Amino acid sequence: MYAVEVPADAGSDEFRRVARRALSHEIAPQTVNFVPSGSSGLFPILPEERPGFHLTVSRSYAALLDDAICHRAEDRFALLYAVLWRLKHSEPDLVSRTSDAAVAQLSLYGKAVRRDVHKMHAFVRFHETSAENGPVFLAWFEPEHFILRRAAPFFANRFANMRWIIATSIGTAAWDTKELTFGPALERPRNLHDCVLNEVWQTYYRTTFNPARLNTKLMTREMPRKYWGSMPETGLIPDMVSGARERLADMDRQPDVSPRFAAKIGRSRKPESAPANDWAALKQEALGCTACPLHLAATQTVFGEGPLDSRIVFVGEQPGDFEDIAGRPFVGPAGRMFHRALKEAGIDRAQVYVTNAVKHFKLEPRGKRRIHSRPSTAEVQVCRHWLFRELDLIDPELVVALGATAAQALSGKPVAVTKMRGIELSWPDDRRGIITVHPSFLLRLANDAARAAEYEKFVADLRLVALLVGGTELDIRDGKRNAA
Ligand code: URA
């Protein structure tokens, strides 16, 4: 029997290293005992990897490993090694056999991990505090599984211009606007006010933050001061601070209730009433948004609409002329084409939530006409927190980007729509997604034949959307996430 030491929070790379060592010597799963670091006792230690050993694993195994490795269950390492052994020796298609007990167990672990990552993305709330060189945002979260390294890049992407620290019971992640670093776990503060005063946090911050790395160039390029005033992140800070204040007040009243527990309480409220109130409050907040200059020329904020338990959210670019006046998304010519295509794909418009990456109409006055103008990267960036807060509330199974602006808002970087369209993908926040063209692209095609051909392709993409959330028209029309 061999003892294989693995740290409790080992990631895929660490596991791969030890698994390769064992496999390279043909050490069978029954003779391997995975134990926490430093506890191998009297068992012989695994020999180093045999030189020249070659191993490739399928994508499906790699995906299973990446998810399941983060689970807390002690048997995950043994299961992962046993599956790898069988894959290599006699069952190359094992991962596709979901009825196999080991594969099924690992898939369940993976599912729980993805859910935990999603919860962390949705429930972390930052609290602003001051440190050397300006504000730092602090948050505390208690994950179920070892997901910190997996979940943290999402916050780096979404709050790229903030310096923040997320402390958890399994470790700490810190972002200095350029680099994500990880440190040891910190003690849970009694409430967030305590953590602001807490020396440990301040020390941790001082040791991980290098002021020389503060990327003012990037900040000013993404959000030029002449537009946004002296605080480049003005669009995101009010959101983070106002959300944090509410939550802080709540936590101060109940200092012994952990965020995880609070999140569970929140979830157990009646599903219809909680999101409806939260959504109405969010919309109200967005209606007053003045974070970028687009609000000056536009008539009003155009917020998303649709059932709050929608399984699919469609994201457009920005409201057009008609939408700006009506205050509702997709009610103009592009919207009519979009609705026709949805219908042909078997998707009931009334059962899906539709919104935009940018909530104000960007226009250029030309005589009496108001000409659509594409939003800049900075405008998309400053507006995207509204979109993410809508997604957090609705928690759809699939998020569909209509065109490049929506894809950029969701992914945080420019996307080549023609290359990426019609492929199931994961957005950086781990939601499932798909990209297709924007319906106004079809309207702009002057040639009838080209337009008809592109329209067919658009409908085909929407049919794929339907398939991805459950396969049948009826499932989508039914609209309930549990119906599929
Ligand atoms: N185009 C969009 O992207 N959104 C709308 O709401 C209308 C047109």
Image (cartoon, helix red, strand yellow):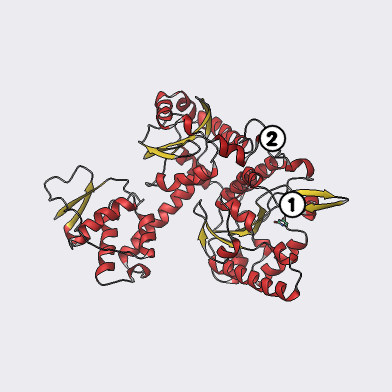
- Position of the N terminus, as image quadrant, is bottom left
The amino acid at mark 2 is Lys
The amino acid at mark 1 is Ser
The one nearer the camera, 159 or 353, is 159
Residue where numbered disc 1 is placed:
373
Residue 254 placement (x, y as % from top left): 49, 31
Q: Earlier in the sequence, mark 2 or mark 1?
A: 2
Residue 270 placement (x, y as % from top left): 57, 49
Element marked by disc 1: loop
Element marked by disc 2: helix
Residue shown at 62%/46% (left/top)?
384
Q: In the rendered structure, find residue 480 and report the number of the disc placed on it.
A: none
Rendered-image quarter of ligand 1: bottom right
Distance from the alpha carbon under mark 2 to that under mark 1: 20 Å
The one nearer the camera, 377 or 118, is 377
Residue where numbered disc 2 is placed:
226
The one nearer the camera, 366 or 323, is 366
Residue 26 placement (x, y as % from top left): 18, 63
The one nearer the camera, 169 or 280, is 169
